Amino acid sequence: MIDPRSFRRWFYQALLVLLFGMITFMHMLPLSTLPAAFPGPDLLLLLVFAWVLRRPEYVPVLLVAPMFFLTDMLLLNPPGLHAGLVVLGLEFLRRRAGMRDRPFLAEWALVAGTMAAILLTERLVLALLLVEQVSFGKQVLRYLVSLAAYPLVAAFTVFVLRVRHVLPGEAEALRQGP
């Protein structure tokens, strides 16, 4: 019989892949032929960040990196740049995931700073390589919309998907392994 912790970890990793697939599929659907006047939030990034701050073992790098790379390829973004920066941001947040007693505003500020660093680094690299970019105003607007949507994604993660912070008893069991 399978260990319940291992089953739960595999279940949530499969759920993450399923949610990634659904969100990416919705991005690819031709719902409108006109350019969007108001950008939507980056739900993929928000979902991964919300999960890694609650349960880092549900979000392994070897799962997230290929998913973001595939998303870059499917959405015709520069291949690998965003995926690499997301992995760096993910690992930065993973190191701070153990602070479960911090208030939500501190978590929100940490995510905001990480997303801002990803945005600015991506723009800098693309500018150095002389790649044509979306206007800075539109990217800042998408950043602000994503930032405003983070509490909703975090609430969805906690209350609907039941991805909660590690409890003190669970933390010791996770360190010891199965």
Image (cartoon, grey):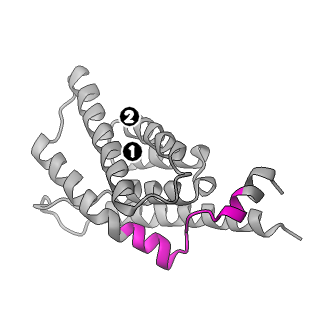
Any part of residue 135 in sight:
no
Q: Is residue 170 magenta?
A: yes
Q: Is residue 135 toward the left or the right of residue 158 in the image?
A: left
Q: In this orientation, which residue lies closer to the viewer: 66 or 118? A: 118
Magenta segment boundaries in residue numbering: 153-171
Give the residue type that dot 2 points to: Leu
Q: In this view, does 169 lie above or below 138?
A: below
- Name the outermost residue toward the right: 1
Measure how far apart labels 2 and 1 are at the Cα level. Answer: 8 Å
Give residue 58's mark. Answer: none
Q: What residue type is labelled 1?
A: Asp
Between circles 2 and 1, the one closer to the viewer is 2
Q: Which image quadrant is residue 174 in?
A: bottom right
Circle 1 sits on which residue? Answer: 72
Ranked by sequence position, the earlier of labels 2 and 1 is: 1
Q: Are marks 2 and 1 in contact (CB under 8 Å)?
A: yes
**Residue 5 magenta-drawn?**
no
Q: Answer above or below: position of 138 versus 126.
A: below
Residue 96 lies left or right of residue 119; in this view the side is right
Q: Indicate the quadrant containing the C terminus: top left, top right, bottom left or bottom right.
A: bottom right
User: x%, y% of residue 33?
Assistant: 16, 63
Image side of residue 2 versus residue 144, left or right: right
Determine the residue positioned at 24% across, 69% down.
31
Q: Where is residue 158 in the image (x, y as percent from the top left)?
A: 49, 72
